[in-house]
Image (cartoon, grey):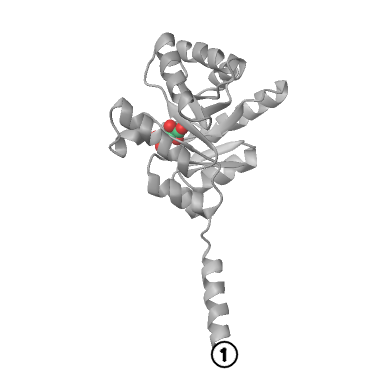
Amino acid sequence: MKFFIDTANLDEIKEAQDMGVLDGVTTNPSLMAKEGITGTENILNHYKKICDLVDGHVSAEVISTDFDGMVEEGEKLAALNPQIVVKLPMIADGVKACKYFSDKGIKTNVTLVFSAGQALLAAKAGATYVSPFIGRLDDISTDGLGLISDIRLIYDNYGFETEILAASVRHVMHVLDCAKIGADVMTDPLSAIKGLLKHPLTDSGLAKFLEDYKKGN
Ligand code: E4P
């Protein structure tokens, strides 16, 4: 399972990269705004900085909602660095743009996916990644993890190569459940990656080992 971090914060990206477990980064316009990154030039420069920090794929989302605008923006983003994955919204023009980019060999991530039907369309359009938002589905009392299972079944039935990128992951249990179901990738905040470390028996066991070592030395 690949681990992506879901942030535009350079310190957090560096911390996850330094742990040695990071495979890529996802961003979205809200995450960029949270870091105070505004204006086209600043946004493009920020993507370049992120690419310099990590080895893997970096999803960069278009703002346009029409096909021509998405193509123009996506081509600019893809030209920044071969690590860039053009992130497109799950709307009709987004699907069309996904097909356009996949035919050109440009990597894509179809975002804002909330149903298996949308995920099927993204795969048909040749998406590199599809991003089902599990946390936001859970927020409205709908089964986010059930969606990941349905997409896994459909993709396996037909051998679609589109990778399932579980997004809107909020906590450690989401990560573990996605791993059990077979999501190819999960993207989450640094807190959920670090949360995987924690177990009280690890902490108490280590404290005891160190205490016993001190007694004998
Ligand atoms: C990632 O690609 C998504 O944009 C992100 O995971 C959404 O997460 P949120 O629902 O916590 O905003």
20 lies left or right of 44:
right
Residue 158, above or below 188: above
Q: Quadrant of the N terminus?
A: top right
Q: Position of residue 141 (x, y in %)?
A: 44, 33
Residue drawn at 55 percent across, 33 percent down: 165
Q: Nearer the viewer, residue 42 or 212?
A: 42
The residue tagged 1 is 217
Mark 1 nearby-residue class (10 Å; few <14, some 14–19, many ≥20) = few
Q: Quadrant of the C terminus?
A: bottom right
Identity of the residue furthest to the bottom in this view: 216
- The answer to whether residue 62 shows anywhere in this view is yes
Residues 160 and 79: in front is 79
Residue at left offset 47%, top offset 15%: 94
Tell which of 48 and 26 is nearer to you.
Answer: 48
Q: Please provide percent x and percent y for residue 110.
A: 51, 23
Q: Is residue 44 left or right of residue 107?
A: left
The x, y position of residue 105, in whole percent, is 59, 20
Q: Is residue 127 above or below residue 213?
A: above
The quarter holding residue 178 reads: top right
Type of the residue with mark 1: Asn
Q: Quadrant of ligand 1?
A: top left
Q: Is residue 39 left or right of residue 4?
A: left
Please provide percent x and percent y for residue 151: 61, 26
Q: Is residue 113 visible?
A: no
Corner quadrant of residue 64: top left
Position of residue 160 relative to residue 68, above or below, is below
Question: Going 44% across and 29% down the picture, which residue do you hit?
Answer: 60
Can you tell me whether the CB of the residue at mark 1 lies under 8 Å from the nearest atom of ligand 1?
Answer: no
Q: Secondary structure at mark 1?
A: loop
In the foreground, 158 or 69: 69
User: Residue drawn 53% across and 47% down?
Assistant: 173
